[in-house]
Image: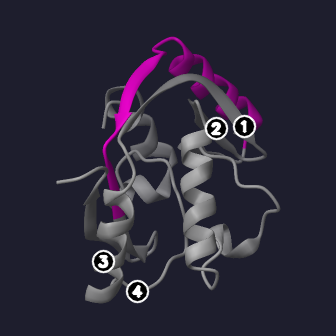
Amino acid sequence: PEAERVVAQLRDRYDPSAVAGIPAHITLVTPFAPATDELCGELRAFFGEVAPFPFELARTGRFPDTLYLAPEPAAPFAALIGQLTARYPDHPPYGGAFDAVIPHLTVAHAASSATLDAIGAVVRSTLPVQALATTALLFEGSNEDGWTERGRFRLGPG
């Protein structure tokens, strides 16, 4: 949520998941399993064992058609991705499309590199963002049909 002040307007314009109902976030695993009561109980227990952790969004990064904010340190996010992948091997991140998963907060998708350059300059002028990871969310849906929050899991006990 700390990043919303920096990226909300840009995501609303350039990130279809924002328009479809997903807040600013760092993806752990997508696509994922259907949100059953059993799965939500498992995730509640899993995330209950993870201590909240601070991180900073201080720099932008690029995939070919995507501008993102890179969390620093990235290791806690990478560890969660690895643990979830080991626990739910039938649901690899991004369907197994990538050899390595880079933790990131998507700001914009654009066909034009020049557009991403311009958006990046705007975003960098507002950094850094100090944040605390305290919650994991489980969404179901799609960018085309909209997303619905199906679970909210606090990190740490309680």
Seen at 35% across and 33% down, the residue is 132
Q: Can residue 116 be seen in the rendering of this structure? A: yes
Badge 4: residue crowd in 10 Å (few <14, some 14–19, many ≥20): few
Element assignment for label 3: helix
Element assignment for label 2: strand
Q: Quadrant of the C terminus?
A: bottom left
> On the rendered structure, is 77 left or right of 157?
right
Task: Point out the tag, 1 or 3, that comes first from the N-terminus.
Answer: 3
Nearer the observer, disc 2 or disc 3?
A: 3
Query: Residue beneath label 2, please?
Result: 67
Element assignment for label 4: loop
Query: Residue beneath label 3, please?
Result: 40
Distance from disc 1 to disc 4, alpha carbons, whole Å, reads 30 Å
Seen at 25% across and 62% down, the residue is 152
Distance from disc 2 to disc 1, alpha carbons, whole Å, reads 5 Å
Q: What residue type is labelled 1?
A: Arg
Query: Residue beneath label 1, please?
Result: 62
